[in-house]
Image (cartoon, rainbow, N blue to C red):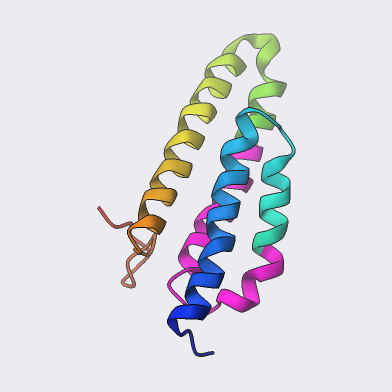
Amino acid sequence: MIFDDARQTELKKYAFAVYILQALYFVVLITPLVGVVINYVKSDDIRGSWLESHFRWQKSTFWYGLFWSILGLISTPILIGYAVLAGVQIWLIYRIARGWICLVDGKEMYLATGGDMHE
């Protein structure tokens, strides 16, 4: 698929929207679910572009965040869950901010050689 500037600008809006929906998690719990649905619906459209790495980053943020949040909630009776939930919140803030900054800068989330992140 050919990704001219106009097409990339259009697709970039979806990545921005998903980062916004993920950030709104701290106010409205359901918004990351809407974001991950957008990711899966638009995955074919962004395949092969630099935005694909952002969509992968956003999906990973959602699924790992959900996993650790559930684990934290389950383990709150033994008090360790509160530390897990606090850690998840910090991790989510980092992931959303890091992804947003790279998107604004026009950078991929992972280097082409082995999946390492840009530093």
The residue that appears at 53% across and 17% down in the rendered structure is 83
Q: Which region shows up in magenta? A: 40-67
Q: Give the answer, above or below, for where 7 lies relative to 17.
A: below
Expressed as whole percent of the image width and height from the top left, the position of residue 41 reads 71, 67
Observer-nearest residue: 5 or 59? Answer: 5
For the N terminus, which image quadrant? bottom right
The residue that appears at 53% across and 61% down in the rendered structure is 56
Residue 45 found in image quarter = bottom right
Expressed as whole percent of the image width and height from the top left, the position of residue 37 reads 72, 57
Observer-nearest residue: 59 or 70? Answer: 59
Expressed as whole percent of the image width and height from the top left, the position of residue 96 reads 48, 43
Q: Give the answer, above or below, for where 58 lies relative to 78.
A: below
Any part of residue 10 in sight = yes
Q: Would residue 117 be counted in the magenta stretch?
A: no
Direction from residue 30 to residue 52 in the image, left or right = left
Kindly give the residue lying farthest to the left in the view shown: 119
Residue 10 found in image quarter = bottom right
Kindly give the residue lying farthest to the front in the view shown: 6
Q: Give the answer, above or below, for where 119 lies relative to 91.
A: below
Direction from residue 1 to residue 30 in the image, left or right = right
Q: Give the answer, above or below, for where 100 lies relative to 114.
A: above
Observer-nearest residue: 112 or 25? Answer: 25
Direction from residue 114 to residue 71 in the image, left or right = right
The overriding secondary structure of the stretch rendered in magenta is: helix
The residue that appears at 66% across and 70% down in the rendered structure is 42
Residue 106 found in image quarter = bottom left
